[in-house]
Image (cartoon, rainbow, N blue to C red):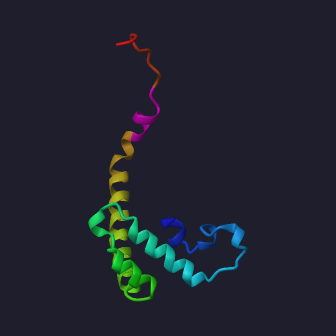
Amino acid sequence: VKKLEREKRLDAIVDPNLKQNYDGQEVEMMIQVALLCTQASPEDRPKMAEVVRMLEGEGLAERWVEWQQVEHTRRQEYERIQRRFDWGEDSVYNQDAIELSGAR
């Protein structure tokens, strides 16, 4: 969902049974609130009162900008770590099968 949101492909997230019968801005707002509510760390998630305010149109824009900055930093760190360990990928995924000595 994060990737689809970044690519602005919200139509790929919405139930096709709606047949384009929805407000794109409302969908974008719901997805943003959902992404804020599903962060890995509970401390980073908004309180329910804040969620209600965001759904009413208050404070979402500011919170969303803040989240995007944090998410961008996380993505960069993840990519940096991935590049650092790319050398090990071959040894992890291309191992020959071994026969175990039996039940333990």
State the residue in front, 28 or 50. 50
Position of residue 94 relative to residue 44, above or below, is above
Q: Quadrant of the C terminus?
A: top left
State the residue in front, 99 or 35. 35
Please tell me in which quadrant of the rendered image residue 42 appears. Answer: bottom left
**Residue shown at the point (55%, 82%) measured from the top left:** 26
Please tell me in which quadrant of the rendered image residue 24 appears. Answer: bottom right
Magenta span: 89-95
Return the residue found at the far top.
102
Position of residue 86 relative to residue 64, above or below, is above
Position of residue 17 relative to residue 90, above or below, is below
Drawn side of residue 6 relative to residue 103, left or right: right
Q: Position of residue 58 (x, y in %)?
A: 39, 89
Count of numbered marks:
0
State the residue in front, 46 or 85. 46
Q: Position of residue 17 (x, y in %)?
A: 71, 68
Residue 1 lies in magenta, yes or no?
no
Return the residue found at the far bottom.
58
Magenta span: predominant SS is helix
State the residue in front, 74 or 10. 10
**Residue shown at the point (39%, 71%) measured from the top left:** 36
Q: Position of residue 65 (x, y in %)?
A: 37, 81
Q: Position of residue 81 (x, y in %)?
A: 33, 54
Drawn side of residue 40 relative to residue 57, left or right: left
**Residue shown at the point (56%, 75%) measured from the top left:** 8
